[in-house]
Image: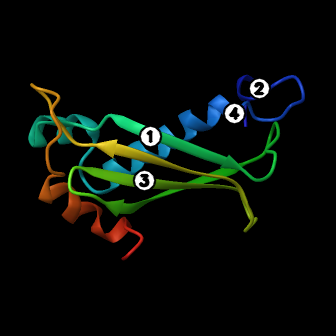
Amino acid sequence: MRWGDVDAASIIFYGAYIRFFEYAETELFREVGLPYGVMFDELKIWLPRVHLECDFQRAARLDDLLQVSVFVGRFGTKSMRLNFEVRRQGEDAPVATAHFVLAAVNQDTFETVPVPAELRERLAPYTAEA
């Protein structure tokens, strides 16, 4: 944890978690060969977040080393849920858990569209059912 991520009590500011989740999500898509630039260019979709939820179980503090995990909780027809878990390195108990719901939308019209089969297939190893 960095100085800019904590409040006056040296506890991680809640808004910093959103950035941590974004980093994990970015790396998930990169891991499956669909970094955002490629995914957006090839699949012609955007993935706006339509819901965010986060629960904080334990305080994380300045200089804690945190690990953020992400996996697909489920696919809907036109959306997907990403689940996140934050833990201190070497500890089993979560510091925070969260989920985002991402809608698949057409880049030109912003109308919802089915989640592309290629995205589903590539993320299959990272789903809760896998």
Q: Which residue is mark 2?
A: 3
Who comes first in sequence, dot 4 or dot 2? Answer: 2
The colour mode here is rainbow
Tag 1, which secondary structure?
strand
Residue for point 15% across, 33% down = 111
In the rendered image, the vertical position of residue 43 relative to residue 81, given as above or below: above
Q: CA distance from mark 2 to mark 3?
A: 28 Å
Q: Amino acid at mark 3?
A: Leu
Tell me residue 79's x, y (percent): 28, 50
Distance from Cα at disc 3 to Cα at disc 4: 19 Å
- Using a 10 Å C-alpha cutoff, classify the residue at mark 3 as few (fewer than 14 neighbours), some (14 to 19) or many (20 or more): many
First in sequence, mark 3 or 4: give its number: 4
Picture mark count: 4
User: Of 79 and 66, which appears nearest the observer?
Assistant: 79
Rounded to the nearest angstrom, the CA distance separating label 3 from label 1 is: 10 Å
Label 4: state its secondary structure: helix
Going 54% across and 33% down the picture, which residue do you hit? Answer: 19
Q: Which residue is mark 3?
A: 82
- Residue that mark 4 sits on: 14
For the point 73% across and 68% down, the residue is 92
Say if 116 sits above or below 16 in the image: below
Residue 104: % across, % down: 22, 42
Rendering coords of residue 63 (x, y %):
80, 40
